């Protein structure tokens, strides 16, 4: 299964970055290869925000939609995403946010497996590069929204 992680220091508050990650329907505006996003449910239960959402990922005629269960834990400042439908055999990713001098340090870990074995092999070879591009996109979006005058 492809596994990768990214660690970044971003010059924004923890709350701003958490809001950015939870604003799933805006992903097509800035996340590479994200064609569409739709939130079906968003509920609060105590210290948790629970979201069910679809992301459509692809390029040109190659695209697929997967459904995720997203849980934001307000106490631990972490977001956990689990696959609940679509072309992925397995998906788990986590976002962790820590206050740091000059901004917020983020940790993003992802572990997944695609049902299609051939695509899974291709993704294994290039996934860290793709994840770095996604992290770049979030960093640029945060800068545009929260730091530009």
Image (cartoon, rainbow, N blue to C red):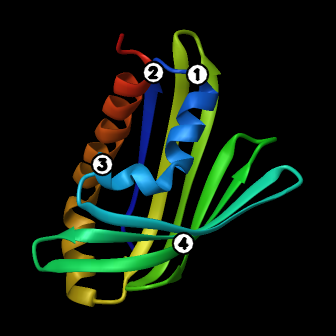
Q: Is residue 112 above or below residue 97?
A: below
Q: Which residue is mark 1?
A: 13
Give whichever of discs 3 and 4 has the lower sequence position. 3
Q: Which residue is mark 3?
A: 29
Q: Looking at the rendering, in which quadrant would you find the C terminus? A: top left
| Residue 107 placement (x, y as % from top left) | 52, 40
Residue 131: image tag: none
Q: Is residue 141 above or below residue 30?
A: above
Q: CA distance from mark 1 to mark 3?
A: 21 Å
Please identify the residue farthest to the left as the structure is shown. Answer: 60
Within 10 angstroms of label 3, few (less than 14), some, or many (20 or more) residues? few
Q: CA distance from mark 3 to mark 4?
A: 19 Å
Closer to the camera, 85 or 24?
Answer: 24
Say whether marks 2 and 4 touch (CB < 8 Å): no
Closer to the camera, 18 or 103?
Answer: 18
Q: Is residue 97 visible?
A: yes
Q: Is residue 102 left or right of residue 2?
A: right
Say whether marks 3 and 2 touch (CB < 8 Å): no
Within 10 angstroms of label 4, few (less than 14), some, or many (20 or more) residues? many
Residue sitting at x 30%, y 48%: 29
Q: Is residue 37 left or right of residue 31?
A: right
Give whichever of discs 3 and 2 has the lower sequence position. 3
Pair 1/3: label in front: 3
Give whichever of discs 4 and 1 has the lower sequence position. 1
Disc 3 element: helix
Give whichever of discs 1 and 2 has the lower sequence position. 1
Q: Which residue is mark 2?
A: 146
Residue sitting at x 37%, y 39%: 138
């Amino acid at each position: 299964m492809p596994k990768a992680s990214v660690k970044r220091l971003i010059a924004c508050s923890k709350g701003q970055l958490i809001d950015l990650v939870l604003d799933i329907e805006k992903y097509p505006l800035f996340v590479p290869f994200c064609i569409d996003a739709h939130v079906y449910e968003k509920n609060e239960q105590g210290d948790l925000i629970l979201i069910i959402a679809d992301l459509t990922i692809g390029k040109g005629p190659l695209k697929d939609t997967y459904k995720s269960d997203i849980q934001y834990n307000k106490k631990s400042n972490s977001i956990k995403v689990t696959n609940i439908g679509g072309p992925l055999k397995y998906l788990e990713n986590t976002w962790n946010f820590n206050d740091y001098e000059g901004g917020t340090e983020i940790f993003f870990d992802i572990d997944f497996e695609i049902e299609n074995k051939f695509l899974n092999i291709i993704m294994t070879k290039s996934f860290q590069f793709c994840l770095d591009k996604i992290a770049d996109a979030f960093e640029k979006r945060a800068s545009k929204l929260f730091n530009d005058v």
